[in-house]
Each structure stands twice: as C-alpha cells, then as structure tokens.
Image (tube, rainbow, N blue to C red):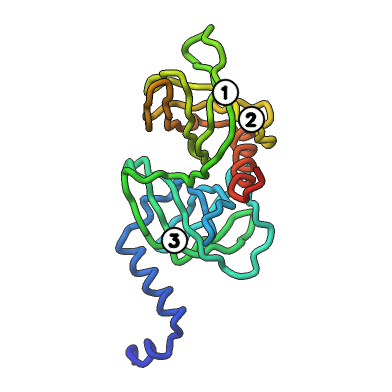
C-alpha cells in the first residue's frame, strides 16, 4: 500500500518529503538563532531576520530592526538565506521557501543546506562607487581621511584609501550620498588588507554591533543600493 501511496503523491509533495529528510540528516537545528539575510531569486536582499524554532526543514523568521521590504506575498517564495554560524565559525547558505505568517513572523519551509565554507562571506555585498571618510577610533587627534567605498553589505564594507592602516584598527566611517544613513557614522573594524599598491590600500571591514536605529537605516540604504537607486 505504501508503494502505491508514493506514486499517488504529486512532484511537489515528493520534493517536500525529500527536503524534510535531507534537513533531518543535516541537523539544521544547530543554526537556530542565526541572523540571516534573505534574498530573492535575483539576489536582492529584502529581509534581515533571525532564524527561530528551527525544526527539521521548517523555521520561523523574526525580522530585524529594518523589518521587511516586501509588503505582500500571495504565494510561497523561493529564497536563499545567508548567515554566519558562530558555533561552526563559518558562513552558511540555506535555500527554501518563505511565506507570511502571524505576528510579523515569516514561515520558512523546505529548508536545505547549500553551502558552508569558512572563506565565504556571510553577507551579500554590492559593488559601489561612493565617496566616504573615516576617523580612527583609537587614535584621537588624527584628522578625518577620505576614502572610496568599493563594496558594501549589511555585515561590512570594503574601502580604498591612501592611508596605511593596520588590521584590527577600528574606524568611524561616513558614507556620502547615502541619504538613509544621513549623519550616522558606521563603527567598523579592519579585518584584512585586500590590496596594497604604492600610495593606495584596500581594507575589508566588518560593522561592529550597530544599534537598532543604525541597523534600520543601513538596511534601507542597502535596499537602495541593491535596486540601483544610487
């Protein structure tokens, strides 16, 4: 009887069952509580959220301070979820579908692990052509320095500068022309020196624990960048 039942199931039902079995094998519950960026098929981030109640291949998504930039969703949407697992010390990529739920929560279903690699970024980055400036937190008296913002994401930024700085330096970064950020300075830290030439350096930086208002405005700024509004 079970064999005939299997043949009666639709392709969608069979895919859902396989997704559930795969999630159980992969033990996705270790990612419960992880902060993720949710991207649609065209790679645009529209939701930054925390994964909650992760059981098998299902979870709830609690939007962060920026909320969601999608106001209506009639059908489940295929998405990618990108985050960083502090437990495994690596970036994690999941795929699945999401739909609107109750109490401002989203429901994620058919979750499956796509990738987890130490060298992969936990955040989507957008190439930019923006001017900025920064000061060095631990070096009072050092004048503000100009820089170019090469790329930017919710988790960090790459800047180009003529100044020689060190890995570990903390910066207060101001980005010009991003109206959503206004007069806010982004607190970030240099993680790596991506490129160095005579009189020019590129620094990969991460943002340091933005407060709720800064995170909300950063989310709006990134949405504008993703959609080519700058």
Looking at the picture, how far across and down is residue 90, in whole percent? 34, 44
Check disc 1: other Cα within 10 Å, few if <14, some if 14-19, many if 20+.
Answer: some
Disc 1 target residue: 133
How many labels were placed on the picture?
Answer: 3
Above or below — where is 93 with respect to 193?
Answer: below
User: Does residue 40 appear left or right of residue 25 in this picture?
Assistant: right
Q: Looking at this view, is 83 or 131 the one in front? A: 131
Above or below — where is 181 with respect to 33?
Answer: above
Disc 1 element: strand
- Residue at figure coordinates x 48%, y 48% from the top left: 36
- Image quarter of residue 70: bottom right
Label 2 close to label 1 by CB (< 8 Å): yes
- Residue at figure coordinates x 59%, y 52% from the top left: 46
Disc 2 element: loop
Label 3 close to label 1 by CB (< 8 Å): no
Cα–Cα gap, marks 2 and 1: 8 Å
Disc 3 target residue: 95
Of labels 2 and 3, the one closer to you: 2
Q: Where is the N terminus found, in terms of image quarters?
A: bottom left
Q: Looking at this view, is 78 or 171 the one in front? A: 171
Disc 2 target residue: 176
Looking at the picture, how far across and down is residue 9, in whole percent? 43, 86
- Residue at figure coordinates x 39%, y 29% from the top left: 191
Cα–Cα gap, marks 2 and 3: 34 Å
Mark linked to residue 80: none
């Amino acid at each position: 009887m079970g064999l005939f039942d299997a043949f009666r199931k639709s392709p969608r039902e069979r895919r859902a069952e396989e997704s559930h079995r795969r999630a159980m094998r992969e033990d996705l519950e270790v990612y419960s509580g992880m902060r993720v960026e949710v991207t649609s098929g065209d790679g645009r981030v529209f939701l930054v959220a925390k994964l909650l109640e992760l059981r098998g291949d299902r979870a709830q998504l609690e939007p962060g301070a920026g909320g969601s930039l999608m106001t209506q969703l009639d059908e489940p949407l295929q998405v990618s979820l990108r985050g960083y697992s502090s437990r495994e010390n690596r970036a994690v990529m999941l795929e699945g579908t999401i739909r609107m739920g109750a109490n401002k929560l989203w429901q994620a279903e058919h979750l499956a692990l796509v990738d987890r690699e130490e060298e992969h970024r936990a955040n989507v980055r957008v190439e930019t052509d923006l001017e900025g400036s920064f000061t060095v937190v631990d070096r009072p008296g050092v004048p503000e320095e100009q820089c170019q913002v090469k790329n930017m994401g919710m988790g960090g930024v790459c800047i180009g500068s003529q100044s020689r700085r060190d890995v570990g330096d903390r910066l207060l970064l101001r980005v010009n022309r991003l109206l959503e950020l206004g007069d806010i300075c982004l607190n970030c830290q240099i993680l790596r020196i991506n490129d160095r030439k005579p009189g020019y350096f590129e620094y990969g930086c991460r943002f340091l624990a933005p407060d709720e208002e800064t995170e909300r405005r950063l989310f709006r700024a990134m949405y504008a960048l993703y959609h080519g509004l700058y």
